[in-house]
Image: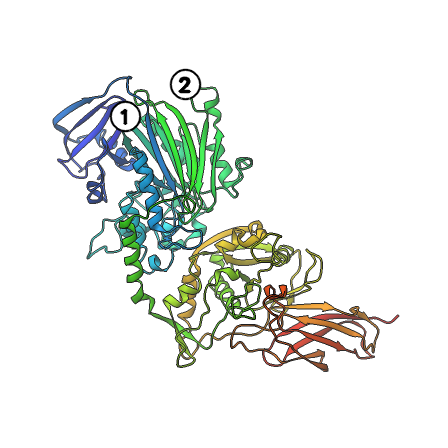
Amino acid sequence: MATSALSRAPRDAGLPVYIRWSPNRYVSGTWTLDFLRAREVRYRHQSFLNRRKVDPLPASSSRARRGVRALTATAGLALVATSTTMITTPASAADPVDIQIIGTNDFHGRLQPDRDIPGAAKYAGAIDALRAANPNTIFAAAGDLIGATTFDSFIAQDKPTIDIFNAMDLDVSAVGNHELDQGYDDLVNRVMAPFDATTNPKGGAGWTYIAANLDEPGTADEIAPSFTKDVAGVTVGFVGAVTEHLPELVSPDGIEGVTVTDIVDATNEEAAELKAAGAAVVVLLVHEGAPSTDCATMDDDPTSDFGSIINGVGGDVDAIVSGHTHLNYSCSFPVASWAGDATRVVKDRPVVSAGQYGAFLNKLDFSVDPATGTVLAVTNENLNLNTGTYTADPEVQAIVDQAKADAEGPGAEVLGQLGGAFKRATKADGSENRGGESTLGNFVADVQRWATRSSTFGGAQIAFMNPGGLRKDMVGNADAGYPAGVTYRQAADVQPFANTLVNKQFTGAQIRQILEQQWQPEGASRPFLRLGTSSGFKYTYDADAPAGERIGTMWLRGQVIADDATYSVTANSFLAGGGDNFTVFRDGTQSRDTGQTDLQAMVDYMARHGADNPAVPVWKQHAVGVNWISDNIVQPGSRRVKLDVSSWAFTGVGDVQDTKIFARIGTKTLGQFAVDNTIVALEDVLSAYDETGTARVALGVPADDTGTLALRLVGNNTGTVIKVPVRVKRR
């Protein structure tokens, strides 16, 4: 007896089973199964499913469906029906069934509202409203619901995020790379396993995780390739897939024995099985995404990661819900095999992604003839939850509030010791200046370079940090002075966005372009954003030079950075994706998301710094402005060497500053010059830049020196050293 679709498979002998016999008839009854020669069909979350609103036929995973299909074909297997009932539905007269699929991706445990993040309670309220408008709704995700989460979720192993998606009755999700941050075993045996207050208090996801292109270790068979749910007599199938770059994105030890296969091949095979088994609609949930939001070019390159999916996934897939790249798009593309198919009404396939952090939701509406399974119409749009009016869901709000309260205790844990305060730059009125170099920005860049220094994570040589990602100074519990402990919560408050660390390869010329983009485009919210940089990297600039020519010499550990050389660079995922108008960051090659969050990197770094080895601020400037007043080509003995120096001072309260700059060539000190550390007035446009710490350097060069001389400018307190080339040439 062949079955066309299975809607619920048995967990143990004697449980009720529903089998779809044909498009219009169902068999239900109690079946006895002999598991001696067949694999067990497992339902990990039956207790959760039991408390749901019951659909005409409950949902099933393809693993379960395949399992029972295998059971019926196993020699010597007893499959006995007791009290079987045949249920028949009308053949053709039924009205079309309107099915709504709500899509989401890359939520990353954003429980609290912040800036353009609506927060979990409003997010849930939007889903409530959509379900109320159409009860024939399936809620599906393209992965990365957990992992890289903000503090309230992170500190509880993402149990609050699991709880809110349970409360929202999420049906199914693709496996994302961040679901595997803690390894395959953690996903399968904690996250996916049933909640138990004693043995599994941090798990209990009530939805099904699917990934058709994951081959599991050994004989393990825990992650289904697909999932089906019957809605008003129409079977909807979902195929899951995870990015093929998974081995580069998580710890190799955590996925030992896991093999990632081709997304397109795995999807097409599984989708064909779902359609053959009676699914009227099949949706691909794929944790891979487009590199831009431009629908016009998204499918241009059939060899690219996402272009290959759009072009290669066959006609058995009716829609693609994607993620991973955190972009918001709602597109449609023609499917070649549909063009000449006279039986198909719909010729274009939706390809969508809902951005990140719950700011948007995908809304896909399918009109299906329940008698024939024909898709009569499909529409797709993305809903902006920041502009829509949605009432916060009280159950989810309670989970969010409890998570915040529960985080207070762990948040007080001391991570390590500080030897001084790490401050952000300030304006004259004491407010934050994102245009100024800061000890905090450089420190965080140092931490991120340290965290990605191994070859596993790209062997970072340089790291950059965006100033907008630093939300508080890092001062620790310093009431009694330093050294002082810094707590989990304090570290999280500095970097609350749970960005991951991304490593890419850049040429020296591209690094120069990145630094040029600190001068923001016209219309940006701030005219200038000074990037924090890791130690060993420094450069000069001329703020008065034309755009594209402002950056002077760049050094890495004393060696001049060559435009045609390649360097390993780490930045957080926001910056690496081109955030804050740093678009050149998108152009790096060999990109790898290390899976480490910025907060976890700080936690690991501070664990190395106890009272006997506290982390101390470094007041050496990495970026110094140099503006020549005279020509930098002079005659021997000339007394006409003049240049203005700027950006010689940090501006955080309590930061150490130089009062003098010494000018030296070789071992000779040619003069000393006073530094003006006055922060310009707030109304002055320069207050938005990094010009504090200015000096006029005017000197002569020795009469016996010729060639290109290295004029070294040295601060008297901070140890800041910068080299300026002076060419001495006889006429």
Could you tell which of marks 2 and 1 lies nearer the N-terminus? Answer: 1
User: Amino acid type of disc 1?
Assistant: Ser
Residue that numbered label 1 is attached to: 4
Q: Is residue 174 visible?
A: yes
In the image, residue 170 lies at what x, y percent?
30, 42
**Eyeballing the image, is 113 above or below 655?**
above
- Which three-letter amino acid code belongs to the residue tagged 2? Thr
Quadrant into which the N terminus falls:
top left
Q: Name the residue under label 2.
A: 343
Q: Where is residue 88 in the image (x, y as percent from the top left)?
A: 20, 21
Q: In this view, does 510 lie to the left or right of 473?
A: right
Above or below 133: residue 604: below
Return the residue nearer the eye: 511 or 110: 110
Answer with left or right where residue 277 lies relative to residue 498. left
- Determine whether label 2 and label 1 are within 8 Å by CB: no
Q: Which of 186 and 219 is in front in this view?
A: 186
Q: Residue 498 versus residue 511: which sits nearer the camera?
A: 498
User: Which numbered mark, 2 or 1, is in the foreground of this view?
Assistant: 2
Query: Which x, y percent locates residue 73?
Result: 23, 29
Which quadrant holds the C terminus?
bottom right
